[in-house]
Image: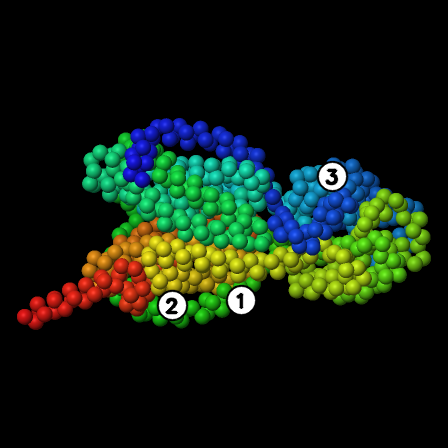
Amino acid sequence: MKKLSELIVKLRYVILIAAVALLIPSAIGYLNTRVNYDILTYLPKDIETMKGQDILLDQFGTGSFVLFVAEGMEEKDVSELKAKIENVDHVADVIWYDSVMDLSVPMEMLPSEVYEAFNSDDSTMMFVVFDDGTSADGTMDAIEEIRKIANKQCFMSGMSAIVTDTKNLAMKETPIYVGIAVLLAVIVLSLTMDSYLIPLFFLLGIGMAIVYNMGTNVFKGEISFITQSLSAVLQLGVTLDYSIFLWHSYQEELEKETDKKKAMANAITATFQSVIGSSITTIAGFVALCFMSFTLGLDLGVVMAKGVIFGVVGCVTILPSLILVFDNLIEKTKHKPLMPEFDRIPKFVARHYLAFFTIFLVLLFPAIYGNNHTSVYYDLTQTLPDSLESVQGANKVDEEFEMNSAYMLLVDKNLDTASMNQMIEELKATDGILSVLGTDSIIGPAFPRSFIPEDLLSDLESDEWKMVLLTTDYKIASDEINAQIAKVDSIVKSYDPKAMVVGEAPCTKDLINITNHDFQVVNLVSIGLVFLIIAFVLKSVSLPFILVAVIEFAIFVNMGLPYYTKTVIPFISSVVIGTIQLGATVDYAILMTTRYLNERNAGHDKKEATLIALSTSMKSVIVSALSFFAATFGVGLISSIDMIGSLCMLMARGAIISMFTVILVLPAMYMLFDKLIMRTTFGMKSQEKTQHHFGDMLHRHKVA
């Protein structure tokens, strides 16, 4: 590494030129990476609901649909509006009353449940069907075009409308996320650094690494909007302290070495050796997300693990080059650090360690209970502001038609008419079902099939399947609709074992089951990986248990607080926050523990070693936590998308809670479990005997 460090210093100008040149292909890659705004597409492809979605697209040409409500309009005007909507690109069909029969025929001729599905007081509803997927670019463009055609009396509800609004909001806010993260990071760095200019070089180096990371996502084809929104601020938060470490190492080397190039080469070597251990735990946390069946975790995990690697490489190549090239400017802007030295706190903590351990024990069980009982939501409309058109549309459908959602059945086309009618009657009798719409229910016993237009029949029937639309007054992701879907599935499969229940509500039900399982898997994998890394780095059997317990306690406190504040959080936060907080903040504990072991090896007793470890590590822990806090807190504060805002707020709060836990609780662990640590850590047993022997000699000398 020494020779490589010297080569980096020697080629500093070449490195900077190459770094700037690489921004061009990275920017091109970034602009050509598609962003997916529909998180339901990350469900496993082999589950029934996803297979059903493929059948709808392949055999019915129906990728998605929205419910369109027109309020206070004459039937003739509604028909004209319907014709305009049908001409919009990627609109496959618009199903309304005049799809069934001519407007000259009274609506009362329809079966009552069919009439009520289309009408309520002065409002009428259409089903707008698209020929592409829920989150396809064509579908979202069609939504925007329909909104231009429609007037203020019209409302649109459905997953495609939600995805379109999510896209518009995320595109508008993502640059603001980065801007506020940078602003808060500059504030933190101004408090902790001894130069006004060095924070800008930190952010420039990290910014290049972020662009490289985002540019290389083009090889994935697409990334989720959550990954797109969070990756820059997360990468800034978890890699900023690498730059701080390099700068501090460089300053230390300058005290021993007058040649700045040699000092920087030594600093690069020291930094690389230190941040490798730190970055591995962070990468392990993100790698754990890749084990989720819900592949949004894989998306976020791969991008962020890659981002940490780019961050480390940038820290030991781009940043040293910037510092050396602009050395004169940096020297002119030097000042005394504004952050105070923490002299009294370590002594206070070391003296009252039993009190802090008692607080740990007292809070442990309420924290675990709160963590296990925090409420989460899965309904994606709840993650968006009420002012958005898709949310207003959902509220209007509920208000006018007492209908909260709609989903579909795919049934064998060859199922006999008697069985089909009997199945429909059972479905109508199911709690919460408002209407059952299909060719059989529209026709009814007294309605000739020949009256149904051929294009409507082709919309509802393919060569193999019949499609049946169910409307329900239960909300998506509620216990009621999940029980209803299970009941409906049982009914249709009793008539046709191959039948499928598909749509947003069934997908959301699968999402709940899958992410509940993923939560357990991700936690176990992240804890296991971090445990092994700590055991390897510290060469200890007991310390992995102690360090993981301390950080897991911080996670329990963080995730338990929403329960006690009666806050409902989005499901994705509960799944990923634990592994991100563990991977990103266990470094604080490793840093302090490494120093503690070094001091014990140097001959200090447990109290002195604890005090020295806390005194020397406290400032680094605070700076690291504040860096992570700075990158995420502002986003949590301003984001209109609760799925992003909630996750960032939890990460920001988690960094601060982990900081306090490491500073206040971990020293108590050293004091209480010192003997266990000494006996179960490689290389410490002989040291313990030496210390006892040294103590006996000192005692005899005093007696003499």
- Number of other residues with Cα within 10 Å of mark 1, as a class: few under 14, some 14 to 19, many 20 or more: some
Residue 638 horizontal side relative to residue 335, left or right:
right
Kindly identify the amino acid type of the residue bearing the numbered disc 2: Phe
Q: Secondary structure at mark 1?
A: helix
Q: Percent x, y for residue 315? A: 37, 40
Residue 605 lies in quadrant = bottom left
Residue at position x 21%, y 65% in the image: 689
Q: How far, Cα to Cα, is label 3 from label 2? A: 59 Å
Q: Which residue is mark 2?
A: 360
Q: Are marks 1 and 2 in contact (CB under 8 Å)?
A: no
Q: Which residue is mark 1?
A: 373
Kindly identify the amino acid type of the residue bearing the numbered disc 3: His
Q: Which residue is mark 3?
A: 90
Q: Quadrant of the N terminus?
A: top left
Q: How far, Cα to Cα, is label 1 from label 3? A: 44 Å
* Front in this rendered view, residue 326 or 44: 44
Residue 657 horizontal side relative to residue 403, left or right:
left
Q: How far, Cα to Cα, is label 1 from label 2? A: 20 Å
Q: Quadrant of the C terminus?
A: bottom left
Q: Secondary structure at mark 2?
A: helix
Q: Percent x, y for residue 528? A: 45, 58
- Number of other residues with Cα within 10 Å of mark 3, as a class: few under 14, some 14 to 19, many 20 or more: many
